[in-house]
């Protein structure tokens, strides 16, 4: 508790207030480091985390004259940050889900005329003003000085991102990206859609032609936790193999396409099965985690 009357006014009084707050270096540094930890890692800070992570970070903060960059570097380069126990424990924010998915699948959001700035702005703002807003997070509309509830509100923290309204919007957004839709502004139409073939081709032809490798690679690339061999096999059978049991059923289809990529029939077969594979993965609950 700080109880002090300075007798100063205006800018001098504000400076004195800030100095008083930061004079409590231990309390302030540890508080800020806990907020960073809850934002970037996990909300549950037990005695072990407090002792071995928060306190050292806070000391770094103070030692560097309140420069936060060394603190972030220490956290992000730590073994703890990359510990498997910290993967898949945090529900993605709407920003993470929307921007992350668009970037991961390299979805085109660029209008055909680069000089049409208003149309470009409208395409980008669609993701924030419509999609993110429907999931209860929109840039520039932070509800209060503490931020959005999931960043500070006990006891559920990140779980507040999921409710009966937002969960439906999250899955709808993902399906819409794979089904595709058009955004038209200023006479320019931009098709927003995942190119499923282009996405898997980044893994190389050897992986793409082997349904087992392809399923495993996509899962590792898209979700933070691994799935059992049984789950992966089930996904392979229901998507790439379309209910068949022989791996060659997919390999033949892929080789037919790569041998004649302009053949509409071959193209449709691999596109349909790849779309089924990828939508199955992103519709898993695990895809909502980071």
Image (cartoon, rainbow, N blue to C red):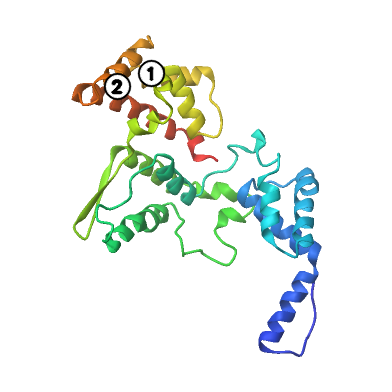
The numbered disc on residue 258 is: 2
- Name the one closer to the observer, 186 or 10: 186
Q: Is residue 126 above or below residue 282?
A: below
Q: What residue sits 58% from the left and 37% below the top?
A: 88
From the viewer's perspective, tell me whether residue 2 is left or right of residue 98.
right
Q: Is residue 165 above or below residue 142?
A: above
Figure quadrant of the N terminus: bottom right
Q: Is residue 164 visible?
A: no
From the viewer's perspective, tell me whether residue 284 is left or right of residue 1.
left
Q: What residue sits 50% from the left and 17% below the top?
A: 230
Secondary structure at badge 2 equals helix
Q: What residue sits 78% from the left and 62% below the top?
A: 62
Observer-side mark, 2 or 1, equals 2
Q: Are marks 2 and 1 in contact (CB under 8 Å)?
A: yes
Please state the horizontal and vertical placement of residue 130, each as a whole percent of the image. 36, 55
The numbered disc on residue 65 is: none
Answer few, some or many: residues within 10 Å of disc 2's Cα (few below 14, many 20 plus, some between 14 and 19).
some
Please state the horizontal and vertical placement of residue 53, each as a whole percent of the image. 75, 47
Q: Is residue 265 above or below residue 116?
A: above
Secondary structure at badge 1 equals helix
- Name the one closer to the observer, 25 or 42: 25
Figure quadrant of the C terminus: top right
Please state the horizontal and vertical placement of residue 284, each as a whole percent of the image. 46, 32
From the viewer's perspective, tell me whether residue 65 is left or right of residue 139.
right
Q: How many marks?
A: 2
Please state the horizontal and vertical placement of residue 163, each as a whole percent of the image. 48, 47
Q: Which residue is mark 1?
A: 209
In three-dimensional space, the C-alpha distance between marks 2 and 1, rounded to whole angstroms, equals: 10 Å
């Amino acid at each position: 508790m700080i109880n002090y009357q300075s007798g100063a006014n205006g800018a001098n009084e504000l400076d004195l207030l800030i100095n008083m707050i930061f004079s409590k270096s231990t309390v302030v540094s540890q508080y800020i480091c806990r907020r960073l930890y809850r934002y970037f890692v996990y909300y549950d800070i037990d005695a072990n985390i407090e002792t071995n992570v928060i306190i050292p970070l806070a000391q770094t903060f103070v030692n560097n004259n309140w420069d936060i960059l060394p603190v972030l570097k220490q956290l992000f380069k730590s073994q703890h940050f990359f510990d498997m126990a910290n993967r898949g424990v945090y529900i993605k924010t709407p920003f993470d889900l929307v921007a992350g998915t668009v970037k991961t699948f390299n979805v085109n959001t660029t209008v055909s005329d680069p000089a049409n700035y208003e149309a470009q702005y409208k395409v980008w703002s669609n993701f924030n003003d419509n999609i993110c807003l429907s999931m209860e997070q929109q840039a520039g509309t932070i509800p209060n000085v503490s931020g959005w509830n999931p960043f500070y509100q006990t006891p559920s923290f990140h779980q507040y991102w999921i409710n009966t309204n937002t969960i439906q919007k999250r899955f709808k957004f993902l399906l819409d990206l794979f089904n595709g839709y058009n955004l038209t502004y200023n006479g320019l139409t931009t098709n927003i859609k995942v190119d499923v073939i282009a996405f898997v081709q980044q893994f190389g032809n050897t992986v793409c032609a082997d349904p087992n490798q392809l399923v495993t690679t996509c899962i590792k690339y898209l979700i933070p936790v691994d799935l059992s061999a049984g789950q992966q096999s089930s996904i392979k059978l229901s998507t790439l193999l379309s209910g068949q049991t022989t791996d060659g059923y997919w390999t033949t289809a892929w080789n037919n396409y790569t041998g004649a990529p302009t053949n509409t029939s071959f193209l449709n077969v691999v596109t349909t099965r790849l779309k089924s594979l990828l939508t199955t993965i992103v519709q898993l609950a695990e895809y909502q985690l980071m």
